[in-house]
Amino acid sequence: MLNQKDILSTIEMIDQQHLDIRTITMGISLLSCCDPDPKRACEKIYEKITRYAENLVKTGEDIEREFGIPIVNKRISVTPMALVAGASETEDYVPFAMALDRAAHTCGVNFIGGYSALVQKGMTKADERLIRSIPEALARTELVCSSVNVGSTKAGINMDAVALMGRIIKDTAKATEAQDGLGCAKLVVFCNAVEDNPFMAGAFHGVGEAEKVINVGVSGPGVVHHALQAVKGQPFDVVAETVKKTAFRVTRMGQLVAQEASRRLDTPFGIVDLSLAPTPAVGDSVARILEEMGLETCGTHGTTAALALLNDAVKKGGVMASSSVGGLSGAFIPVSEDEGMIAAARQGTLCLDKLEAMTCVCSVGLDMIAVPGDTPAETISAIIADEAAIGMVNCKTTAVRLLPAPGKTVGDTIEMGGLLGSAPVMPVHPESSADFIARGGRIPAPMHSLKN
């Protein structure tokens, strides 16, 4: 039973501590849209998305108004497009991306994800066609997001795909050069990608999912930061317990919104993703949470341990609040989207190597990091390989979303605006990884993958 204190506390969390529902994402299966005629397939895709999601935005706005809970984004995820487009007799997959974009604009959503391929063990012709089309597809669309899964704990790492993705990221940056390489902000490379992730740019609707589903992503870095201010100097046991209790309250709110959206849209409720997703706003930063634990600046020694505690406590608190926790669920560390991370990167305390270490213990991976525009494709591929290895060996999802900034070098800043924020260009190692990437083939799965 809620008492007056609980109600006032929740109001304060929303009003002063940046608590929000980051996204309501409707997942839609497009397998029924497969057609040998690519034009007909695109028509089916547009028709199905607009029919299923026509009330998504209005429903989100109604819930936001009635419950007084901010719902920042309304999004759509679809079946990995390589699986759908592969049935069509065409080598040009860009029209499929444009059909997705047109449907997203009609529905009024913020983004649509699923221009994706799953190539952890090998590439079909459809996979390769889609991947090679990504630069043009992201340059010619506004709301489409793309992802490619290049590795998994069960399959190992597809190094041919890793090598290709380094070139694709460079080509995407060039194709969107007028916007500081903005296309790369809508492209993520995964290891162990999950099928029910509501967050962009990596959302897609997995083949093991229902015909349509509602997934919700909550977020509350500001709430956690505020809660930790009340336990200054106390032992880490107390810190962990405080984060758990806070994550419980945040997740309950997400569960409420998810169930209500599911009922109103007559769509099965999937999961609540309880990831702490920061924004560029002051007071909504994961980095500031770590600093509240006693670090002078995020990135200094102790940062990885602090992040490990935070990630674990968020998950423990969340699973007590909902029986349907999924997606990525933990703490995101996107540099450009977190004002504390931006400050630490500009100061030089937070570097690429430290961020890589932090990804061993948090959700996802190297996210929204700007690197010099002249960074070789092989270096980008090697960064992807390192991150995929962390995910593969540790049985966790990892990802890379790098932004090679055309014409920019270390010390410059790229501006993307909105939730994407701004990013200081960070240095990469100048030593070459070209011969390493040129080997190709597949890095075998680790021994502990044999768990059948």
Image (cartoon, rainbow, N blue to C red):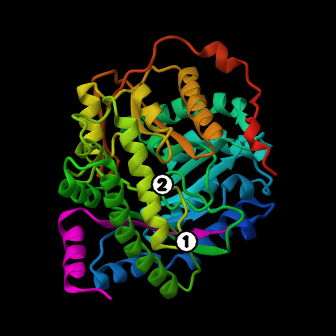
Looking at the rendered structure, the secondary structure element under dot 1 is: loop
Q: Residues within 10 Å of mark 2 (few under 14, many from 20)?
A: many
Looking at the rendered structure, the secondary structure element under dot 2 is: loop
Does residue 296 lie above or below 259 as drawn? above
State the separation of the CA atoms marked 1 and 2. Answer: 20 Å
Q: Position of residue 214 (x, y in %)?
A: 54, 73
Q: Nearer the viewer, mark 1 or mark 2?
A: 1
Does residue 121 lie above or below 452 as drawn? above
Q: Residues within 10 Å of mark 1 (few under 14, many from 20)?
A: some
- The amino acid type of the residue labelled 1 equals Ser
Q: Position of residue 393 (x, y in %)?
A: 64, 37
Residue 7 located within the stretch drawn in magenta: yes
Is any atom of residue 405 visible in this view?
A: no
Asked which quadrant contains residue 44, the reply is: bottom right
The residue labelled by disc 2 is 200
Quadrant (top left/top right/bottom left/bottom right) for the N terminus: bottom left
Residue placed at 65% from the left, 27% from the top? Answer: 163
In this image, 293 relative to 317: left or right?
left
Q: Which region shows up in magenta? A: 1-29
The residue labelled by disc 1 is 324
- The amino acid type of the residue labelled 2 equals Met
Marking on residue 14: none
Q: Position of residue 422 (x, y in %)?
A: 29, 40
* Viewer-nearest residue: 166 or 398: 398
Residue 407 located within the stretch drawn in magenta: no
- Say whether disc 1 or disc 2 marks the residue closer to the N-terminus: 2
Residue placed at 40% from the left, 35% from the top? Answer: 369
Does residue 440 lie above or below 401 as drawn? above
